[in-house]
Image: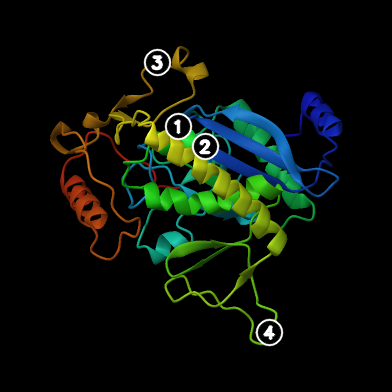
Amino acid sequence: MELSRELLSLLQQKRMPKHSPILVRIFKEESELEVWKQDVTGHFQMLKVYPICRWSGDLGPKLHEGDRQAPEGFYTITSQLMNPNSNYYLAINTGFPNSFDRANDRDGTFLMVHGDCWSSGCYAMTDEQIGEIYSLARDALLGSQASFQIQAYPFRLTPANLARHRTNPNMEFWKMLKIGNDHFEATRLEPKVTVCDRRYVFDAYQPPNLPQPLVFDPTGKCPAFVVNPKIARLALEKQRADEVEYAQLVKENVSVTPIYSGLDGGMNEVFLSRLPGRIIPLAMVLTNGSQLPQLPPVPWTDNDGSLANKFFGALLESKSASQGLVASTDSTSR
């Protein structure tokens, strides 16, 4: 599929070469997918926002095969992850699990951004939307970009949203994602992502007096590293301003959003009236129709005997043993 005249005109208006790099940002709660593209200055600028037709699960990362969760985190997309022959029209494999997911014992397969507006662990678009997104990705990969980045978030990581979700057990994980988010928003440059000590590290470079090259082991101790001073300064300024705003919102006791929505995923409001019935109660996909209980905040690392691991592990074991009411599709080729 070739880019439309309208999209080619938009690229020209924004001074974005057809084959310049792209970057994709996904926000679950807002049900929006953003395509950013590098302009002639070398910085990324917003090209287009696409309303997401369907995503499944709830806010929070994907933990295990069959949990219906759409992934959250930083994913590197190469041409090998592009599927022009998908059962869902066209598909872009997120590459889940990445090195962070594997280091934290998270598993699952074939988690995609695809068409057909139907999801079980994926981000589903309309066929027309994925046609445009796929073409933009293909053209970028035909240029100088060997891969592009997908940043998948639970919501826009603003102080207001973080304050609303401050009791969520995934908060520490989301604060880690926010570091990468801040690096991008402060610089409009793609953050360099590495993993060590089972956590994401952003824009890490070798210290000037260290002769040996940096080696990052996803499960091992992080080596000594430095962050580019220009990136670090801008990101730190944003972080401090956000922390002041967040603290004020908490002090004002802004309303807290329930930890669990009670629904299986979401879709952008533009599709709700056109596609009724695509959002279903989580009770229909949980064992015996039970609701997820409210949990206190727990650490994001889930492979060390934490409450999160015990709870979700027990839940998923019971789901696997049951005759589930909705079959997962994230274990089959798309």
Asked which secondary structure carries label 3, the reply is loop
Under mark 1, the amino acid is Glu
Label 3 crowd (10 A; few <14 / some 14-19 / many >=20): few
Under mark 2, the amino acid is Arg
Q: Are marks 1 and 4 in contact (CB under 8 Å)?
A: no
Q: Residue at x 47, y 54 (%)?
A: 176
Q: Is residue 243 above or below residue 117?
A: below
Q: CA distance from mark 2 to mark 3?
A: 26 Å
Find residue 250 and report its image quarter. top left
**Mark 2 highlights which residue?**
156
Q: Are marks 4 and 3 in contact (CB under 8 Å)?
A: no
Q: Are marks 3 and 1 in contact (CB under 8 Å)?
A: no
Q: Are marks 4 and 2 in contact (CB under 8 Å)?
A: no
Observer-nearest of 108 and 187: 187
**Mark 4 highlights which residue?**
209
Q: Are marks 1 and 2 in contact (CB under 8 Å)?
A: yes
Q: Position of residue 217 (x, y in %)?
A: 49, 75
**Mark 1 highlights which residue?**
29
Under mark 4, the amino acid is Asn
Observer-nearest of 211 and 134: 211
